[in-house]
Amino acid sequence: MAKGKTDWIEKEIRELKKEGLYNEAPTLKSAVSAHVKLNGRPLINFASNNYLGLAADRRIIKAACRAMEKYGVGPAAVRSIAGTSILHKKLEYALAKFKKADRVLTFQSGFVANLATIPALVGEEDVIFSDELNHASIIDGCRLSKATIIRYKHNSPKDLEDKIKESRGFRRSLIISDGVFSMDGDIADLPSLVAIANRYNILIMVDDAHGEGVLGKNGRGIVDHFGLHGKVDIEVGTMSKAFGAVGGMVAGKKIIIEWLTQRARPFLFSSAMTIPDVAACLEAIKILSKSDRLVTKLWENAGYLKDQLSILGFNLGKSETPIVPVIIGDEKKTREFGVRIRRHGIFAMPITYPTVPMGTARIRLMNSAIHSKKDLDQTVQAFAHVGRELKLL
């Protein structure tokens, strides 16, 4: 490579480090569970999206191993040629039944599911109405579609309707919202969005990445939470969080899912989910279908942690879910807070600009059903200690 071609990259990286925005991924030396090992040190884990503790559940591991013994590891082909295993079909049937949807199509991840779905539904002549706090995969899927993107105020049905009334001359329209907003933990006003979509004859899509396994009966998600079965056209979800594995899904009307099998590029041009992940997801559905014990425990833990941190005086924003954002505000203090609580045995990541707006930096606590009361109490004590050290309380 000729000298000077990457000088600009080196300069940008130096700037990121100088501004404290350089991202270094922590490397775990253990399974993802309530406790993890980071740099050889045991920590209570509040950094992962392992809501139900299934990532290292023995039932999930055994199901994945059994499947590999019978079907191997990778599909070695795209779904439309020779990459569809009978297990993929079983998973899609089980998901459709679990989510009470007409049909489900699986993808390699929730991120990929959005990149696949949005460009298959809208194009250059169309318009997308997108919540201003929708996450990265929705944003990237919208960009790939080349449709006009109109952002409406966060969780504001009124602003959405105003924007729809103002728009003219488009062929087709699509409303897209996250179900649970991962940085603040608030829930989309899906009933109002559905009503607006019906009023103006617009397709509606919700991405329930942080609602799968968390909201609804037995963790069926936001559509079940609001009793909107059959009224949401497209529900995108992930199996990479609460299900403890990796994979994405799109649930919805039969005709829409059929269209995705013909036009969704990651389905047509990228290999399918691996066999162990498919088997793991099937087992997770079986566990959730039998009992809501893990979902109930998740919410109990979240309620207790929120109550204790609120009593101390921390600002938890407007979270309605087990996501607990401890909002500190100042970027440097938040990063220092993250360093200090790790010394107290707590692994939770500071979230700063540009992931969240400047001045709203926070430590984000991701609850799990497998955290013990002792884990939660130790976490509260650590936050109290560091909060006083940094003169936040």
Image (spheres, grey):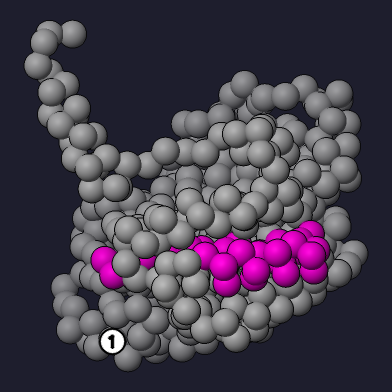
Q: Quadrant of the N terminus?
A: top left
The x and y percentages for residue 206 are 49, 68
Viewer-closest of 199 and 188? 188
The x and y percentages for residue 33 are 73, 48
Left or right of 142: which side holds 116? Answer: right
Q: Which residues are magenta?
A: 358-386
Residue 253 falls in image quadrant: bottom right
Residue named by callout 1? 159
Please name the residue shown 64% across and 70% down the image: 380
Viewer-closest of 342 and 125? 342
Residue 366: within the magenta?
A: yes
The x and y percentages for residue 338 are 48, 55
Please name the residue shown 19% across and 29% down the image: 9
| Element carrying mark 1 | helix
Most extreme residue toward the front, as rendered? 389
Left or right of 251: which side holds 289? Answer: right
Q: Crowding at label 1, few (<14), some or many (≥20) Cα neighbours within 10 Å?
A: some
Residue 235 in view here: no
Viewer-closest of 159 and 3? 3
Most extreme residue toward the left, as rendered? 4
Residue 195: within the magenta?
A: no
Please name the residue shown 28% across and 70% down the image: 359
When the figure is inspected, residue 256 is found, relative to residue 195, above or below; the finding is above
The amino acid type of the residue labelled 1 equals Asp
Please name the residue shown 90% across and 64% down the image: 290
Residue 309 falls in image quadrant: bottom right
The x and y percentages for residue 393 are 47, 79
Viewer-closest of 279 and 36? 36
